Structure formats: structure tokens, C-alpha cells
């Protein structure tokens, strides 16, 4: 859907040298609680879905019904904001291109994810291009967890986007300027985006672009209600 792609938060990547996260790589969207991390992450998902790519949403906190509800609410907002005429057709497109895997009550394991992905590919003929992983605790996750996700990205030839919760009271950064909690594992991450709410607006900023230097103006302003890019 060209109308959405033009105002998707991932327009930020047009300001990067690589232009994309790319298959086999891990990326993360980080922000404080209440800024709009979930909405922005689902916009990243819609960017893939409306580009006719197949996506698996991996939820570590919410049930499939709740995840579906998030998508439906945000899509309804997009319909209004972008004056989408073929709503039913577009809804069918994203439902056809999306699968949801939910791992409740600390039941997530990399081996289980791989098994579920193989089932999708081999039995349902659903080969994903991208994984969205929501609910991973970056403060508690071990390096081995990200190494496991890296093997998933390579084995299934997908890019994987995470969400990460940052905190106002923790301002630590590593030597590369990457804020906590991503500072612990940034060597495993190819792209890092940060969502910030400031007195002058809501901005999505590029903090890491593979091994490329970051441009000083590598950010886009987002509408605080729709989280779509504004001029």
C-alpha cells in the first residue's frame, strides 16, 4: 500500500547507508514505557505486510487474540488517517501475510521457535520474510538468547525486529553511545532505533546502522497520535 509506505516509520531507513535491516540480521526499536513502542513496532510490521512480505509476530507476553486486537485497532486508525478506500482488501492482505506465535508463562525457547517455524514452512507453505518479537526482556536476556535468535535469522533467512524497554532513570551508555539496555548486546544488533517523546514532538532516531557511521540528522518526526511520519 503506497499510501502507508510513504509515511511508515521505516522511512527513517532512507536516511541510513544500508537502507534496510536485511535478512539474517537483528534490529531493535527501543523506548520508554508509554511513548508508543508497541504501536510503532506494529507499524514496522505493516510496512512489511503491505509490501507483500510474509511476517511472523512472536509474542512473549500477550495472547494471539490480544495481538490481533492491536493490529485491528492500529489498522482502523490507518484507514481513517490515510483515507483508505479498499479497507476489506487491505485487511485480507495483512491477515493472509501474517502469522502469530504466542509463548505464554515463560514457555519460550529458541528450539521451540525453530520447530514452529519449520511447521509453518513445511506444512502450511508459509515462508516468512520477517519476524517481529515483542515482549523480550532486554535487561534479563542473556547473550546466548540473542545468539539463538541470530541462528534463527540465518537458518530461516529472515530479518528480526525486537522491542526493548528503556528507563528514564537509567542513562548509561556504552563506548559507542548505545543506551541501556541495548548497550549490553549491541554487538549482536545490526540496527537500533530509538523512539523519543520530547517537548517539540515525537521522534524516531537511528542509533546504529550496521557498521556505517550515523548521520547527525538521522531521525524522523512522527505524529503523536498515528505514529506516521510528518513533514
Image: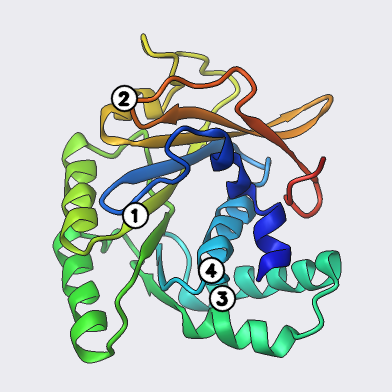
Label 4 – label 3 distance at C-alpha: 19 Å
Q: Nearer the viewer, mark 1 or mark 4?
A: 4
Helix, strand or loop under label 4: loop
Q: Residue at x 52, y 35 (%)?
A: 193
Q: Identify the element where label 3 is drawn.
A: helix
The mark that comes first in sequence, 1 or 2, is 1
Where is mark 2, residue-wise? 184
Sequence order check: which comes first, mark 4 or mark 2?
4
Q: CA distance from mark 1 to mark 2?
A: 20 Å
Which residue is pictured at 55% across the width and 53% down the height? 41
Binning the other alpha carbons within 10 Å of mark 4 as few (below 14), some (14 to 19) or many (20 upward) gives: some
Question: Residue 187, percent across and down?
Answer: 27, 28
Q: CA distance from mark 1 to mark 4?
A: 15 Å
Residue 163: x %, y % from top left: 47, 46
Q: Which residue matches tag 1?
A: 159
User: Of callouts 1 and 3, which one flags the residue occurring earlier in the amino acid sequence?
Assistant: 3
Q: Nearer the viewer, mark 4 or mark 2?
A: 4
Q: Which residue is mark 3?
A: 68
Which circle's residue, 1 or 4, is located before the other in the chain? Answer: 4
Residue drawn at point x = 43 percent, y = 52 percent:
135
Horizontal side of 179 relative to 104 (left or right) equals right
Tell me the SS state at disc 1.
strand
CB contact under 8 Å: marks 4 and 2: no
**CA gap, disc 1 and disc 3:** 21 Å
Q: Residues within 10 Å of mark 2 (few under 14, many from 20)?
A: some
Horizontal side of 151 relative to 64 (left or right) equals left
Residue at 24% of width from left, 73% of height from top? 117
Left or right: residue 188 compared with residue 52: left
Query: To which quarter of the image does residue 119 belong?
Result: bottom left
Q: Position of residue 13 (x, y in %)?
A: 54, 41
Residue for badge 4: 51
**Disc ID at residue 83:** none
Amino acid at each position: 500500500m503506497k499510501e502507508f509506505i510513504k509515511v511508515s516509520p521505516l522511512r527513517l531507513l532512507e536516511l541510513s547507508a544500508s537502507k534496510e535491516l536485511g535478512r539474517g540480521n537483528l534490529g531493535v526499536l527501543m523506548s520508554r514505557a508509554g511513548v508508543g513502542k508497541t504501536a510503532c513496532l506494529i507499524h514496522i510490521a505493516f510496512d512489511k505486510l503491505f509490501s507483500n512480505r510474509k511476517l511472523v509476530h512472536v509474542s512473549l507476553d500477550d495472547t494471539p487474540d490480544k495481538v490481533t486486537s492491536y493490529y485491528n485497532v492500529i489498522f482502523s486508525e490507518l484507514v481513517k488517517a490515510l483515507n483508505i478506500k479498499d479497507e476489506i482488501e487491505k485487511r485480507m492482505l495483512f491477515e493472509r501475510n501474517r502469522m502469530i506465535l504466542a509463548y505464554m508463562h515463560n514457555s519460550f525457547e529458541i528450539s521451540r521457535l525453530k520447530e514452529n517455524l519449520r511447521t509453518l514452512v513445511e506444512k502450511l507453505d508459509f515462508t516468512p520474510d520477517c519476524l517481529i518479537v515483542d515482549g523480550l526482556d532486554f535487561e534479563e536476556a542473556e547473550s546466548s538468547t540473542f545468539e539463538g535468535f541470530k541462528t534463527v535469522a540465518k537458518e530461516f533467512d529472515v530479518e528480526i525486529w525486537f522491542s526493548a524497554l528503556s528507563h528514564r532513570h537509567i542513562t548509561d551508555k556504552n563506548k559507542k553511545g548505545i543506551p541501556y539496555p541495548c548497550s549490553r548486546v549491541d554487538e549482536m544488533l545490526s540496527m537500533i532505533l530509538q523512539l523519543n517523546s520530547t517537548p517539540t514532538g515525537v521522534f524516531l532516531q537511528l542509533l546504529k546502522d550496521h557498521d556505517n557511521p550515523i548521520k547527525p540528522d538521522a531521525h524522523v518526526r512522527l505524529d503523536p497520535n498515528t505514529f506516521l511520519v510528518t513533514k
